[in-house]
Amino acid sequence: MTALPPLNALRAFEAAARHLNFRLAAEELSVTQGAVAQQVRGLEARLGVPLFDRLPRGLALTEAGRRFHSPLRKAFRLIEGAVEDLSGESQITISVTPSFASKWLVPRLPDFTQSHPEIAVQVDARERLADFQSDGVDIAVRQGRAPFGSGVTAVPLFSTGFVPVCSPETAARITRPADLAQHILLNDTHGLWPLFLQRAGVSGKPKMMSFSQSSLAIDAAVSGQGVALANEPLVSALLDAGQLVRPIPDELVEDLGFYIVTPKQPRQPVLVALMKDWLLSQA
């Protein structure tokens, strides 16, 4: 019987293969990047085959690495499931964008955890899309246009209206769309300010400040740096609290709705159904 490689080396490879990045694997395992790289090199030496192609901008699995990772991932899932069954606890992983996580999901999560204390929730708040196969994600919320792929289902969470929002002090100087041209407009990756201004009949080229995430543009608006064009669901709590206001009633409606995305055959169908129903109840 062939002796198994060290478990730490297998864990390091499995995490690195999912992320295709030693740094992200190290963060997940709470070790250094160098430790992950060393464990992977040792595993490759033991097996006698390269598992990764080291590229200038990351990693790519070799053919041997792909064949090795698939059953290894399944094996770790079986171990995780056995631990969960024995401990009486379950875990569900939800993938969302950073902005959706900070402005909508996280403030509402206590309601879910209080209703289901036996379920641990892991929030994966990154921009990358979940593949539900090798990343351990059970359910995702994404903004865009359906469909999102042949192997998944997408259920509308809420439609999207983009509304101008700013601090109460800034709003005091805005009474009509044309006044927006006198203020800094806070843009995010959607880049919808030009379309909004065109439809509102605002001429000229206002100053703009751009952000890589919607949450950053929203935070800048709260601090009085300008006017953000934000998804209304993401700023509803800030509007209710008076930290943000809508200076004008104009709204830009686009078909960039939020959807609950799940694999057609989830590995934890009961937990996925619970989380999906809870998300819909919150919307």
Image (tube, rainbow, N blue to C red):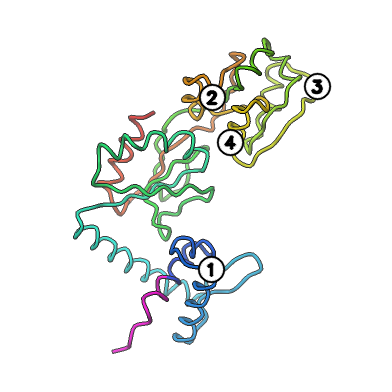
Point out the tag, 4 or 1, that comes first from the N-terminus. 1
Per the image, label 2 sits on a secondary structure element best described as strand
Viewer-nearest of discs 4 and 1? 1
Check disc 3 and report the residue beneath it: 204
Viewer-nearest of discs 3 and 4? 4
Q: Say if 65 sits above or below 74 in the image.
A: below
> Is residue 139 or residue 28 the one in the foreground?
28
Spatial distance from mark 3 to mark 1, Cα to Cα?
Answer: 50 Å
Per the image, label 1 sits on a secondary structure element best described as helix
Disc 2 residue crowd, few under 14, some 14–19, many 20+, Cα 10 Å: some
Q: Range of the magenta residues?
A: 1-11
Q: Say if 22 sits above or below 280 in the image.
A: below
Check disc 4 and report the residue beneath it: 214
Check disc 1 and report the residue beneath it: 33
Point out the tag, 3 or 1, that comes first from the N-terminus. 1
* Quadrant hosting residue 174: top right
Disc 1 residue crowd, few under 14, some 14–19, many 20+, Cα 10 Å: some
Q: Amino acid at mark 2?
A: Gly
Q: Amino acid at mark 1?
A: Gln
Please name the residue shown 25% across and 43% down the image.
117
In percent of width and height, residue 188 lies at 64, 36
In percent of width and height, residue 57 lies at 64, 64
In percent of width and height, residue 263 lies at 37, 49
Disc 3 residue crowd, few under 14, some 14–19, many 20+, Cα 10 Å: few
Spatial distance from mark 3 to mark 4, Cα to Cα?
Answer: 24 Å
Contact between marks 3 and 4 (CB within 8 A): the answer is no
Check disc 2 and report the residue beneath it: 161
Viewer-nearest of discs 2 and 1? 1
Contact between marks 2 and 1 (CB within 8 A): the answer is no
Q: Say if 50 sits above or below 178 in the image.
A: below
| In magenta segment, residue 175 | no
Viewer-nearest of discs 2 and 4? 4
